[in-house]
Image (cartoon, grey):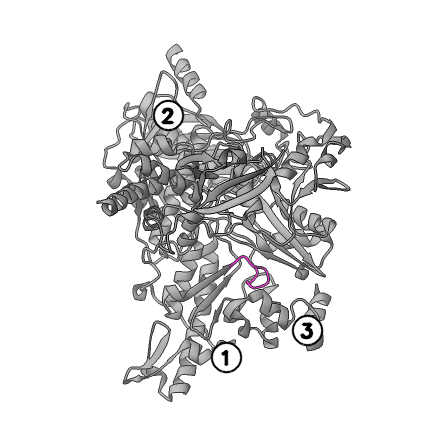
Amino acid sequence: MKNDDFELFGSKEKIESTQFGRRDFFKLAGGGLFVLFSVGDLFTLQQRRRRGYPEDFNAYLKIGEDGRVTCFCGKIEMGQGVYTSFAQMLAEELDVPLSSVDMILGDTDLCPYDSGTFGSRSTKYFGPPLRQAASEARGVLFRMAAEHLQTPLDNLTIQDGVISDKTNPTKKVSYGQLTKGKKIERHLGTKPPIKHYSKHTISGKATDRLDGREKVTGEAKFAIDIRLPGMLFARILRPPAHGAKLKSVDFSGTKKIAGIQVIQDKDMVAVLHKHRDIADRALKEIKTDYEMPGFKIDNTNIFEHLKSSASEGNIDSESGNVDEGKKLAIINIEKTYFNHYVAHAPSENHTAAAVIEGDKATVWASTQSPFRAQGEAARAIGFPTEKVRVITPYVGCGFGGKNSGRQVGEAARLAQLAGKPVQVAWSRKEEFFYDTFRPAAVIDIRSGLNSSNEIVYWEYHNYYAGNRSSQPFYNIPHYKVLSYGGWVGGGGGSPHPFGTGAWRGPGSNTNVFAMESHVDIMAFECGMDPLSFRMKNLTDKRMQRVLTAAAEKFGVSFTKAPSGKGFGIACTDYLGTYLATMAEVHVNEDNGEIRVERLVCAQDTGELINPEGVRMQIEGCLTMGLGYCLTEEIHFQGGQIKDENFDTYEIPRFSWLPKIETVLVDNPEMPPQGCGEPAITSMGAVIANAVHDAVGVRMLMLPMTPARIKNALRAKKSI
Amino acid sequence: MEKTINFRLNGNAVRLTTSSDRMLLWILRSDLSFTGTKYSCGEGFCGACTVLVNHEPVLSCQYPIQEVEGKDVLTIEGLQKNGALHPIQEAFLKHNALQCGFCTPGMILGAYSLLKKNPQPTTKDIFTSMEGNLCRCGAYQRIIQAIHTASQMMRGQAS
């Protein structure tokens, strides 16, 4: 990399001869941006390729001659709303109207390096450097204005990107007039502070989605909508099962289809056509013979398999001495919790469109990690990383499933082999096949209560869920939390017969289901109602506040379960975001169906950037979470994925919708926390707890399908 | 078998010669580059490819092109009139009734068809009519609010 940097940035002549040269950069940047790029920008370019967020504010923003401000951000927009909230943060600190901000997201040539959009980290981690950059730019612009207007700095004020003299308002100059569209070369010796939230007029205000209009008119482009001159649509031959080996392939039927190009290169077999559906047809005509793998694992024995595959555990958190705690207990409870594999099932399947022009490749990708995709594409075609540009249009859902994706390398490789632009858009079947599922997981919990109904010990064994949110937040003097393998799996050494990975709220969905179910069981065993029991065992003020706020909105009093009313509670701390969810469910004892009637979620997200956006994320989390509670489970036999579409893999529909109410718990003193994932992690426990309150059965496995509910009801009756 | 097919797309005459058993979705997205209509499940289970043919909602991924002969096809691109958004589009914006936006064109056309037939639907009517349109982001509650608002706006316009 060092040599590449030198080559690329070492001298003007060499720069002019690369794709990063001025002329090309103008073309790439398009529109009013081009004047901002000059040879003087090289420092910024070099910075951009380094890990970590750059110091230079020019990496984050450009002010056009017309006063429009462009924000550059390596994150992507997949529905979570950063397109709007980052624009708010930038507009606020820079003192420009929100409508003057244009967003460029996930473009590896234009945006500062970013590791990817996941973990509810965008606002929390990109927000501070963005605010700092805007604040410094504003400070520099004020100094430029003071010189331009020949006015003391203290006399200046700003409104909507126009700086004026308080003592003589006719003396004024706009940002655009000051910069004339050029890069701001000046910097401040000390970074100015960002605004206090009490001064905010844009950030912190409920704001409608800035990407809304494009999305309701059909103008919004996703990777799957990219159309390039001469582009071919590729369909790739896939094995019938993970681990299957191709023995023979016959293209004789395929080649009869007019216009079909067949590519066979090492492990890659693909058919390409200018129309996607004709390529689909050609793929069906390929005759193949596979050697099938001998895996014996399926849905019925996966949990035994996972436990028997586990190696020595790692201690994730520990306090006191569990053996001492056991001596204090008068009630001991031991339970095991399970969840099955769950698919991301994004609305837009994994897609990439690639074109290679000379020594430069450009890939439009449906990805959560443009810079990782850039590396993957470069490796696939043997290009230096900087010769690949990844552009991320709007992404049709991610949920962690698009942190990685082989489609990027596939599209780049096929574009290279075909000598034409190529789009690879997975079918729904491919999406299910290559998904990195939320792992099946097992959690063993042992805990005990003393005579005062206090939790005195907690022993937690986590098999393959991943350890996020597994640290107890109740007052427990003696606890030990161990994990045996994380959420990433697949390939050599993994117990999973296919890929597993991060799924919206990774680790936490399973952990909160187990922990908060177990807490409910403890409340039941000691004869307390589930809210009082939680309050009694908590001293964390933020958790108490979200529980109180949710309970006020929910407006019913909890009594010892099972009350027959179907009320449930779950609360959690997801990487600093606190929330409590309460549910009301009805269980049909005849057919085993759970109907979720109402959900209330109170969330403390710290300082809010876009309260409307936070509400949207909570609502989306709760709605999507219904799926993994009630129906979502991947059926498989060895490496063969039996679910191929939404006929057997059921995701939430309109008719499932409960009444959803959100409470935003005010906490502006705390820096902004994440909101894309936290609320979904409460769903397993809140529904399981409500089911117990409704009909007195304790569901220990997700999803709680009608068959499992009926089995549990039968087992209860037979006691 | 190749066939010449004539239909109207968003009010404009289209004539094309192609294999008659191809599906409307691919003619729109691939041959005509009308990419507002989305491919998602490809088998008629998700509603993302919903368009209207003679005012009836159809799953374009399952709808053979030869069936559109002489008919009117309406896609999301045809909903604006002279640059002005349709009330349903306005209502979706008002309620932020979308997240990633991928299912949105299908949702809006589904709602359009519902409101044509039933100008004042109950929430239950919306459940029934829209059940085949999936939103993985979980924006259903806001979509329902948007349809109610659009219903009011459209009836207000009509009176």
Q: Is residue A307 above or below residue B15?
A: above
Q: Chain of mark 2?
A: A
Front position in the image: B122 or A204: B122
Residue highlighted by disc 2: A594
Disc 2 residue type (three-letter): Ile
Q: How far apart in space, not on screen, are marks 2 and 3 (Cα)?
A: 65 Å
For label 3, the crowd category at 10 Å Cα-Cα, with few meaning under 14, some 14 to 19 and many 20 or more, is some
Percent position of residue B49, x then y: 48, 39
Q: Is residue A18 left or right of residue A439?
A: right
Percent position of residue B25, x then y: 52, 39
Q: Residue at x 35, y 34 (%)?
A: A657
The answer to whether residue B97 is seen in the rendering is: yes
Disc 1 residue type (three-letter): Arg
Residue highlighted by disc 1: A186
Q: Residue at x 75, y 40 (%)?
A: A267
Residue highlighted by disc 3: A16
Q: Earlier in the sequence, mark 1 or mark 3?
A: 3
Q: Earlier in the sequence, mark 2 or mark 3?
A: 3
